[in-house]
Amino acid sequence: ESEPNRLPTADLRGYLGMGGWLDLSNSRGNLQHDGLGIELVGVDDPHLGWDRYPEQVAKKSGALRLGVTHAPYRRVLDVMVDDDVDLILAGHTHGGQLAVPGYGALVTNCDIDTKRAKGLHGWPGARPTLDPNSAWLHVSAGLGTSPYTPVRFACRPEASLLRLVPVSA
């Protein structure tokens, strides 16, 4: 089986980089905001097998570590939890795209359970406030549809806006 054709993204990455965009494809990065260190780690698309998790490093004291993956496959989510990520951001599922009212998504198009097809959850289990070996996972239902099933049913499109606030001491 041959690898799908990659889009010519090198020029786009260059232009976005000149504007301050940080490419997290199989890499790490750092930001500062109001004196808070924000560590970032990301992978290329796990659905296509392009993910290569970067070498793990110790998290700086007091830093927030965010993980980014297009598709929330268990192998990526688990290594991010092992890497002390606080919040994992993902998409890919389209929220299940086809849902049954009162039940929810029928599929995820990856290997996570359908109850986590969209929204904020703990991974792998209880939310991090209850389990220190867990991370927050936010899966956005996104705006689009699969080209193979170009419809949504009982699953509204969404653009997520998350506001991160510090935990009260």
Image (spheres, rainbow, N blue to C red):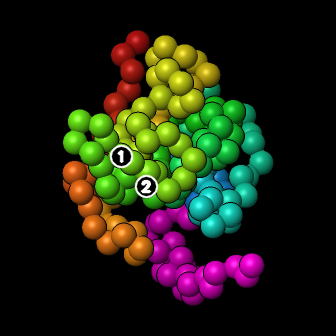
Residue 57 placement, left or right of 117: right
Is 3 within the magenta? yes
- Image location (x, y in percent) of residue 106: 39, 48
Q: Which residue is mark 1?
A: 105
Q: Residue at x 50, y 56 (%)?
A: 109
Is 36 within the magenta? no
- Which residue of the protein is positioned furthest toward the right in this rendering? 55
| Quadrant housing residue 23 | bottom right
Magenta stretch: dominant secondary structure: loop
The N terminus lies in quadrant = bottom right
The dot on residue 25 is none
Mark 2 vs mark 1: which is more N-terminal? 2
Q: Which residue is mark 2?
A: 93
**Above or below 151: residue 80:** above
- Extent of the magenta region: 1-23
| Quadrant housing residue 27 | bottom right
- Image location (x, y in percent) of residue 63: 55, 33
Q: Residue at x 53, y 24 (%)?
A: 125
Q: Nearer the viewer, residue 18 or 144?
A: 144
Q: Amino acid at mark 2?
A: Thr
The C terminus lies in quadrant = top left
Q: Residue at x 54, y 49 (%)?
A: 72
Q: Residue at x 37, y 52 (%)?
A: 96
Instruction: Say how many tags the image has.
Output: 2
- Image location (x, y in percent) of residue 93: 43, 55
- Image location (x, y in percent) of residue 19: 43, 72
Q: Amino acid at mark 1?
A: Ala
Disc 2, SS: loop
